[in-house]
Amino acid sequence: MSRVVKTVVAIVSVALPGSLGFLYWYHRRQMKACREADEKRNDQGNHECEVMANCNAESMEASLIWKKCTKHPGHSTFIPVEDFSITHLPNIYQSPELVEIIENVASRTVRLRVKDTSPARPDGYVFSRYHGRNITHTGTGWVRDIHDGQGPCRCPDCASKQTPMTRWWLVRIHTACHVVYDTLEAKVTSVDINSNHKISGLAGKAMTMNGLKVISKNEEQDLCRFYCATHDEILVDWLQTFTAQWEHLSSKKLTVADNAYSAFCVVVSHPHGQAKCVTIGKWKKCSEQNEIGECAQMYTTDTCRGSSGAPVILLKNLRGPGGWVPTIFPHSQTLDDGLNQSAIGGMRSY
């Protein structure tokens, strides 16, 4: 027991007789939670979820983990989204078109807080030993598109109401399978949209949606798509601005020389569950292709725990000379050789 805790225990036990036992029990419980979080954090191989022990206020806990990080002490290469500008890009990439692409993806990037672990995770799979333990892990994802809901709203707020909302929407989130494994986990996932940056249109606001169901996943490729339900029309209108813009950006040829953008690679993530950041690096190579010609991407762009599932923005030449277009893969893991690796997918925008 630390000197501070001993001092507090001593003071309270004098002031409030009988409270010493409670304080001792509470301290033991907190220490157990921290120990279990450390165990879960270290039980994911090379994947990069962050794990919260709920020992302190969540923001305080994430801040402490950020400071203790040994992979990127100080996080000097992690640029807060609100500070990102064209000057952060290497000269060869200082294009207004690329800035627009990065800002669009950043606007749609979300933090995922998964509050329990599914018993359906197979033995030996990431976090399979922790179902029913209520130890939160965090990752990152992004909003892909939005669809009108049918019938009464199925969000948790409406589920307990006599008259649920009838105008609502399904928001499709993309991430890695090891972050959100199945519908049980989707239902206990909070999807945080932090719009507190210059490009949000809703500056100063942070909103949370609740997961509803997994619509597709691939354990081998480490891909997951799931729905959230919301009846927040202001939020939906704002998100639809960026999903519509992405359809334009992802189909537009970039006006650059054929070899200029082959190594471009940017990640937008919530490292350690903190505010979203942009990191800039280089694409290096693809993994060996699977039977249908899909592969994982490998890159030097910095990531940390909490970056699992984050959008990895690459440029690929799909259209012949001058045909560079953006594509996105979910971040999957860090490799022993120092490179990072995405989930497995095709060259089209995931």
Image: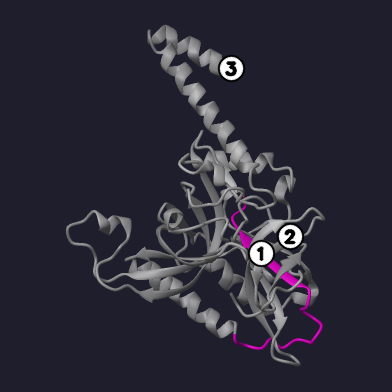
**Badge 1: how crowded within 10 Å, few (<14), some, or many (20+)?**
many
Q: Position of residue 234 (x, y in %)?
A: 36, 69
- Asked if the residue under mark 1 is in contact with the one under mark 2, i.e. CB atoms within 8 Å, the reply is yes
Of residues 275 and 52, which is closer to you in this image? 52
Q: Amino acid at mark 2?
A: Asn
* Residue on which disc 1 sits: 267
Q: Is residue 33 placed above or below 79 in the rendered structure?
A: above
| Residue visible at 49% across and 47% down in the picture | 117
* Magenta segment: 251-271
- Asked if the residue under mark 3 is in contact with the one under mark 1, i.e. CB atoms within 8 Å, the reply is no
The local secondary structure at tag 3 comes to: loop
Cα–Cα gap, marks 1 and 3? 41 Å
Cα–Cα gap, marks 2 and 1? 11 Å
Residue 331: image tag: none
Per the picture, the main secondary structure of the magenta-coloured stretch is loop
Whether the magenta-drawn stretch holds residue 150 is answered as: no
* Residue on which disc 3 sits: 1
| Residue visible at 54% across and 18% down in the picture | 5
Sequence-first tag of 1 and 3 = 3
Whether the magenta-drawn stretch holds residue 254 is answered as: yes
Q: Position of residue 205 (x, y in %)?
A: 44, 58
In this rendering, position of residue 78 left or right of residue 2: right
Q: Amino acid at mark 3?
A: Met
**Badge 2: how crowded within 10 Å, few (<14), some, or many (20+)?**
many
The local secondary structure at tag 2 comes to: strand
- Asked if the residue under mark 3 is in contact with the one under mark 2, i.e. CB atoms within 8 Å, the reply is no
Sequence-first tag of 2 and 1 = 1
* Residue on which disc 2 sits: 340
| Residue 183 visible in the current orientation | yes
